[in-house]
Image: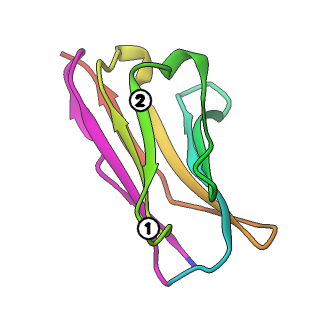
């Protein structure tokens, strides 16, 4: 199973962007989905996660600006980004956990710059 992330790109400070991530085939029993990011020279850090029951969690630095959601089938996860800042610049990686196995996407670059 491969996760395919899309939606990254160049956006101006204060702008919005929506990331999507879907598996290459239907994945059953997904327990958790979410996004990490990694800026140059930094460690990968959690941005947001959502469980199969709909419980969400966010890193403090994106609370109130980013929203994570999933489709009704539960196989696609989204990250709606608003009021982006230059420090949000990073490669964003999606992940799924299904049956105890973690799957990672290839990453999509988000660059916030004027």
For the residue pair 54 and 77, the one nearer the viewer reads as 54
**Residue 94 at what x, y percent from top left?**
53, 52
Q: Which image quadrant: the C terminus?
A: top left
Q: Is residue 88 magenta?
A: no
**In which quarter of the view is residue 21 placed?**
bottom left
| 48 or 43, nearer to the observer | 48
Residue 24 against residue 111 in the figure, above or below = below
The residue under label 1 is: 22
Q: How is the image coloured?
A: rainbow
Q: Residues within 10 Å of mark 1 (few under 14, many from 20)?
A: many
Measuring from the top left, give residue 111's x and y in whole percent: 32, 30
Looking at the image, tell me whether mark 1 or mark 2 is earlier in sequence order. Answer: 1
Please state, as top left, top right, bottom left or bottom right, where the N terminus lies in the image. Answer: bottom right
SS at badge 2:
strand
Check disc 1 and report its element: helix, strand or loop: strand
Q: 91 or 83: which is nearer to us?
A: 83
Which residue is at the far right?
Answer: 100
Residue 100, percent from left and from top: 81, 68
Look at the image and give the residue range highlighted in magenta: 2-25
Q: Residues within 10 Å of mark 2 (few under 14, many from 20)?
A: many
Relative to 41, is 29 above or below? below
Name the image quarter holding residue 46.
Answer: top right
Q: Is residue 15 magenta?
A: yes
Q: In x, y percent, where is residue 8? A: 31, 44
Residue lying at the far front in this picture: please name it. 53
Q: Which residue is mark 2?
A: 66
Does residue 102 appear to the left or right of 17 in the view shown?
A: right
Q: Residue at x 53, y 60 (%)?
A: 105
Tell whether 27 sits left or right of 86: right
| Vertical order, 34 against 83 (above or below) | below
Residue found at x 34% / y 32%: 81
Q: CA distance from mark 1 to mark 2?
A: 19 Å
């Amino acid at each position: 199973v491969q996760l395919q992330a899309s939606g990254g790109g160049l956006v101006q400070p204060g702008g919005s962007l929506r990331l999507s991530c879907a598996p290459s085939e239907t994945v059953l029993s997904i327990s958790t989905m979410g996004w990490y990011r990694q800026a140059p020279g930094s460690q990968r850090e959690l941005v947001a996660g959502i469980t199969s029951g709909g419980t969400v969690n966010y890193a403090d630095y994106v609370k109130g600006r980013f929203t994570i959601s999933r489709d009704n089938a539960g196989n696609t996860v989204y990250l709606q980004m608003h009021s982006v800042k230059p420090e949000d610049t990073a490669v964003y990686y999606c992940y799924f956990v299904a049956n105890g196995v973690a799957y990672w996407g290839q990453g999509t670059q988000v660059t916030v710059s004027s």
